Amino acid sequence: MTRGRDGGAGAPPARQRALLAAIVAAIVAVSAAIYVGVAADDGTTHHNTLAGGRGERNNPAAPASTGTWVASWATSPVGGEPGTEMTGLAGRSVRNVVHTSAGGTSARVTLSNLYGQSPLTITHASIAVSAGSGTAAALAETMRQLTFTGSPTVVIPAGGQVMSDIVPIAVPHDGDVLVTTYSPTPSGPVTYHPHARQISYAAEGEHTRDATGAAYTEQSTFWRYVTALDVLSNESDGTVVVLGDSLTDGITSTTGANNRWPDVLSDRLRDALASGRDVPRYSVVNEGISGNQVLADGLGRPAENPSGLNRFGRDVLGRTNVKVVVIVLGVNDILRHPGTADPDRIVAGLNTLVERAHAQGLKVVGATLMPFGGHRGHTDAREAVRQRINEEIRAGRVFDAVADFDKALRDPYDPRRFRSDYDSGDHLHPSDKGYTRMAETFDLDTLKGGAPAEL
């Protein structure tokens, strides 16, 4: 065995070692700068990473910072926007307004082309903090260009999604952020989330970096393309995902008021921490889809409004740094069944969701099914199914912990109905006061801990 001058086994001369070290350093630097950003939007490969934990992604061009990556806002892609089947939104800037849970010092955005039938080319994209409520204007000093593996242009294949590079930006908690995209070429249908309960905007031409918002003369109640906003946060250690239907989507809440019950829950957590309570430092994101069921998909390929079972990987496990999932599903499985729904099948579906969460170490809080007496779909048979499912939930045979929304919102004199001031008027969805009541009765201590140990 030969030895080098410095006594190391087989060591090369110093000059050769220096050259070799320089070559290795260059290779590492190039490798760290190259990563794949486009993935199938099916929950199986949400993020491709070279470093970091589940759901994390490093951008070597971003400044060094500390904190934890969490989801600050998210929504579920539901289907293809009607009227966009041929040309999509070619030649228009789309400015989505999203409301944050946690604040942070850096951000990254996920864009989806799940329901597109052709590749979606985004040539310009930006992120900025909104100048105020109910406006397309941005705080000019916060306007940032979004890039994708270093390029301002990205092509998202049909059925795919992409995560942007990390961008330094001070994202406020409980605030509005503007995510703007521009595509010059036809590509449809547009992947969207209806019933956003939030006004977003669009403009003719490329105006992604405009701060004034003057060009944004079109308004919509949809979120288009954007499905997640992650932040590097010093105020949050993880994410709570609420998986639900219209009762979580907040379909009857006041537009622009951010009074969906997960919004109020996020506010409660932050206030509790500020007052010194021992509760988890978690962000809360809303993965509600109006009309969603535990068991049945909607129509189409890929299915619009996919079942809770089929979207769990994408909308829960695919979110960043998830610690707890809250499940508020089951009413539509009763109402949309042509005959009498089978409570055992619905409970079995809920149990499957819990098993999948536990397999990933996630705790599951589940809600009782709220009353819908007086709604056109209410029957005695359906009421019996609801009561049977709630018995199983309350007995602890489904979830790790229970949020008893039924008890909190029902009329004590007619438990099949909402209390009148909690009823939006359709006897199925809560009023703003009802949504607030849901969040206020949610026990924050149930968010502590992880999945129970398997015996």
Image (cartoon, grey):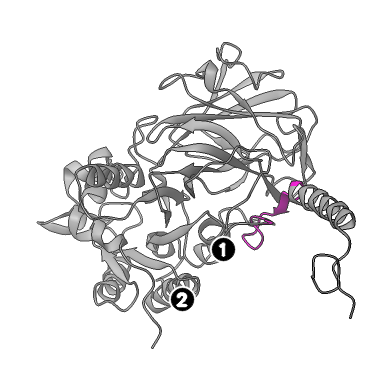
| Residue 421 vs residue 385, the one in the foreground | 421
Numbered disc 2: secondary structure: helix
Numbered disc 1: secondary structure: helix
Q: Quadrant of the N terminus?
A: bottom right
Location of mark 2 (residue): 355
- When the figure is inspected, residue 432 is found, relative to residue 55, above or below; the finding is above
Task: State the residue at coordinates (56%, 60%).
Answer: 311
Numbered label attached to residue 313:
1
Image location (x, y in percent) of residue 371: 26, 58
Q: Residue furthest left?
A: 413
Task: State the residue at coordinates (44%, 30%).
Answer: 176
Number of labels in the image equals 2
- The residue segment tinted magenta is 33-50
| Residue 87 vs residue 52, the one in the foreground | 52
- Three-letter amino acid code at disc 1? Gly
- Three-letter amino acid code at disc 2? Glu
Could you tell me what secondary structure mostly forms the magenta stretch?
Answer: loop
Does the magenta segment cover residue 38?
Answer: yes
Image location (x, y in percent) of residue 182: 70, 27
